[in-house]
Image: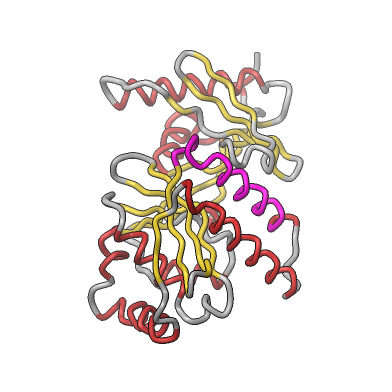
């Protein structure tokens, strides 16, 4: 929420141990499903708390024709349907699916299905025998920033300049500037003492590591640098799962994420609740 607050014009509010989120995406106001910030005795109690939060948002937006929720996971979609079954319009957000992997699979790359990844890493080490990995820390953060600057410069030279790339550039800069405050982690790959790849991540909880950014510059990217940094960073962690986030609808990125054989793909939906039904009339 902090790093992407400017991109999505994020606003948050707290009420009765609930977190409310509102975004402005492409000049459209959308909400996140309210999040309960306390531990409940039962799932049903928590679900009722979330439904109460949704009802509050509805009451605050009754002057409009509808209310829109984005990035709705399957459990919350079921919850919405249980209350507003015939009053919602749902749309799958395939570009926003989260790709979940077993960390051990990424760290070991065992078996025939990962043969290509092992080949990529072997090619990288043959081409760059001086290649090495370092855990990201306060002492080497500047090298991660150097990789991002070189990566963006190359992308723009290839005609890939866009508002989203510049926004990501600013987000990564702020992430590195607040590295310790945000409790981030990551790694850097060096070749002949030159930084050529970096990754930035954070622990969501004791079981899940979330990969936020991963960049490798040419020609090293073409020679297996991504496979190398992915494996080496996974080796340094002890969580059960890695969340490598969404593919943004980019075919090449989707292919790359599928090539690591996710153990689960977390689906997301957008949901519109229509206020034209009698239930919502005052």
Q: Position of residue 243 (x, y in %)?
A: 40, 53
Q: Position of residue 204 (x, y in %)?
A: 39, 41
Whether residue 89 is visible, yes or no, is: no
Question: Total label count?
Answer: 0
Taking the spot 26% from the left edge, 51% from the top edge, the residue there is 238
**Of 188 and 82, which appears nearest the observer?**
188
Q: Quadrant of residue 259?
A: bottom left
Q: Is residue 178 magenta?
A: yes
Taking the spot 28% from the left edge, 49% from the top edge, the residue there is 239
**Of 26 and 233, which appears nearest the observer?**
233
Which quarter of the image is occupied by the C terminus? top right
**Of 142 and 150, which appears nearest the observer?**
142
Q: Is residue 89 magenta?
A: no
Q: Is residue 70 above or below residue 147?
A: above
Whether residue 224 is visible, yes or no, is: yes
Q: Position of residue 264 (x, y in %)?
A: 35, 57
- Asked whether, in this view, residue 230 is left or right of residue 273, the answer is left
Taking the spot 66% from the left edge, 54% from the top edge, the residue there is 169
Name the dominant secondary structure of the magenta segment. helix
- The part of the chain drawn in magenta is 165-183
Q: Is residue 50 above or below residue 211?
A: above
Which quarter of the image is occupied by the N terminus? top right
């Amino acid at each position: 929420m902090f790093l992407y607050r400017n991109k999505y014009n994020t606003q948050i509010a707290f009420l009765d141990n609930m977190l409310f989120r509102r975004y402005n995406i492409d000049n459209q106001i959308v909400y996140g499903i309210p999040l309960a910030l306390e531990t409940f005795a039962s799932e049903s109690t928590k679900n009722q708390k979330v439904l109460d939060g949704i009802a509050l948002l509805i009451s605050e937006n009754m002057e409009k024709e509808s209310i829109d929720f984005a990035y709705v996971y399957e459990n919350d979609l079921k919850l919405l349907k249980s209350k507003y079954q015939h009053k919602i319009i749902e749309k799958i957000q395939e570009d926003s699916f989260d790709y979940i992997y077993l960390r051990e699979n990424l760290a070991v790359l065992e078996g025939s299905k990962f043969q290509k990844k092992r080949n990529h890493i072997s090619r990288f080490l043959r081409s760059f025998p001086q290649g090495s990995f370092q855990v990201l820390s306060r002492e080497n953060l500047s090298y991660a920033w150097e990789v991002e600057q070189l990566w963006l410069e190359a992308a723009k030279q290839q005609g890939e300049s866009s508002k989203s790339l510049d926004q990501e550039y600013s987000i990564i800069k702020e992430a590195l500037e607040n590295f310790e405050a945000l409790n981030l982690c990551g790694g850097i790959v060096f070749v002949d003492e030159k930084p050529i790849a970096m990754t930035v991540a954070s622990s969501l909880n004791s079981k899940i590591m979330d990969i936020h950014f991963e960049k490798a510059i040419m020609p090293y990217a073409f020679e297996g640098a991504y496979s190398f940094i992915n494996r080496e960073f996974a080796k340094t962690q002890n969580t059960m799962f890695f969340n490598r986030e969404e593919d943004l609808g980019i075919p090449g990125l989707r292919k790359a994420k599928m090539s690591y054989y996710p153990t689960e793909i977390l689906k997301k939906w957008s949901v519109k609740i229509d206020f034209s039904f009698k239930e919502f009339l005052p």
